Amino acid sequence: MARIAYLRDQLARAERLAKAILDRHTVEQLQAFAAECREELQVLTRRAAA
């Protein structure tokens, strides 16, 4: 469960930063990181529900 909380926090942080930053390259990297966190979060929550 600690990993799930960590991923939720990182996901929220990356999305919040992506909205505030003007550098397009950095925004793309943050969005990609958020997508990776979201994918791992989905896998972990499916495992926890099973």
Image (cartoon, helix red, strand yellow):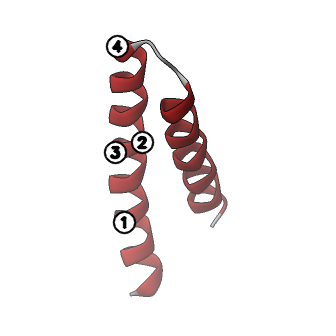
Disc on the earlier residue, 1 or 2: 2
Give the quadrant of residue 27: top left
Identity of the residue drawn at 52% across and 21% down? 21
How far is the residue under mark 3 from the one under mark 1?
Answer: 11 Å
Location of mark 4 (residue): 25
Disc on the earlier residue, 3 or 4: 4
Location of mark 1 (residue): 42
In the rendered view, does 6 fall on the left or right side of 45?
right
Circle 4 SS class: helix
View extreme (bottom): residue: 50
Q: Between label 2 and label 4, give the one nearer the viewer.
A: 4
User: What amino acid is at disc 1?
Assistant: Gln
Identity of the residue drawn at 64% across and 59% down? 5
Contact flag, marks 2 and 3 (Cβ < 8 Å): yes
Q: Between label 3 and label 1, give the one nearer the viewer.
A: 3
User: What amino acid is at disc 4?
Assistant: His
How far is the residue under mark 2 from the one under mark 4?
Answer: 14 Å
Disc on the earlier residue, 4 or 1: 4
Q: Which mark is residue 35?
A: 3
